[in-house]
Image (tube, rainbow, N blue to C red):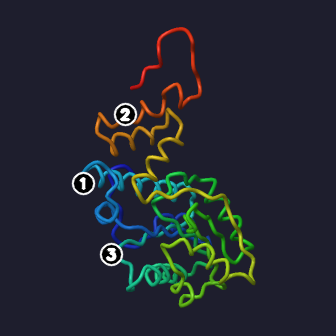
Amino acid sequence: MSGKRFCSVIYNMNCKDNPCLSTALLIFAQSDKVQSTLKPIAYNRKQNEVLWHKMNERVLLLAHKTKLPYFISDENTQQGDSFGDKLSHAIQSVLDKGFDKVIVLGNDSPGLRLTHLHEAFMELQDKSIVLGPDFKGGTYLMGISRVSFNKVAFAKIDWQTPKVSEQLRALYSKQKIGVIAPLADCNTRSDFEKLLRDLPFYSTFKSVLLSLLFYSFAIYQFFKYLYTNTSIGLNFNKGSPVAAY
């Protein structure tokens, strides 16, 4: 996937290899350029565009690894005035292609793993809807079946607010709902900074984020804060002090 721009049209990559699958993935997100304008997270404009390119690239790679058919919907294909209109239209577009189930995901949950997508797929086989809740009342992932999807009601959910998860549960209260492990989504600089503290020290993605979010001085300050004796909970009486690079 490296070097490829986030596609500007809804398209299918895996269908030719799996023509009989009834479940498809829908990546609902904006292109690198638009997302970087809407969410100025990194130190400067260029770094911010690279950051969202990496985020889009990462979710594309995950989708490809599932071996499920997947589609992408960005600002060039989304139709409607509101977020709900655009999302509902995108889901309906996938269902209209003959799929019975759609798993929707965005590009702002760096903690998303292949295991989450596999769990959502399995849950959706006998559930009307599957939710992957975030920690702010929203969802980072959602699976929906054709028989349960109501385009009009879906569009009326207060999307992009802390009410999303609650309203979806209420809408499907009389049906079977699957829930997978919650994850954090990253929409602000503080979200990304918290993510950095949670990622393993030797994480490649952590190195990429550090290089994009901070100036060299800021990187030094971040590590100084994170890896002091207080932060790691150790206080040696002998030897050299812990170096903060």
**Residue 81 vertical position relative to residue 202 in the rendered view, above or below:** below
Q: Nearer the viewer, residue 203 or 91?
A: 203
Q: Quick check: 207 left or right of 105? A: left
Q: Residue furthest bottom?
A: 152
User: Which residue is painted at 46% across and 53% down in the image?
Assistant: 191
**Secondary element at image label 2:** helix
User: Which residue is painted at 69% across and 78% down in the image?
Assistant: 128
Crowding near pointer 3: few (<14 within 10 Å), some, many (20+)?
A: few
Mark nearer the N terminus (1 vs 2): 1
* Horizontal and vertical percent position of residue 44: 25, 50
**Residue 56 vertical position relative to residue 95 in the rendered view, above or below:** above
Task: Residue type at mark 3: give it.
Answer: Asn
Rounded to the nearest whole Å, what is the CA distance between mark 1 and mark 2?
A: 22 Å
Disc 2 marks which residue? Answer: 221
Disc 1 marks which residue? Answer: 45
**Residue 234 vertical position relative to residue 22 in the rendered view, above or below:** above
User: Which residue is painted at 54% across and 88% down in the image?
Assistant: 151
Question: Which mark, residue 236?
Answer: none
Q: Residue furthest top?
A: 238
Rounded to the nearest whole Å, what is the CA distance between mark 3 and mark 1?
A: 22 Å
Is label 1 in contact with label 2 (beta carbons under 8 Å)? no
Mark nearer the N terminus (2 vs 3): 3
* Horizontal and vertical percent position of residue 190: 43, 52
**Secondary element at image label 1:** helix
Q: Quadrant of the C terminus?
A: top left
Is label 3 in contact with label 1 (beta carbons under 8 Å)? no
Question: Which mark, residue 76?
Answer: 3
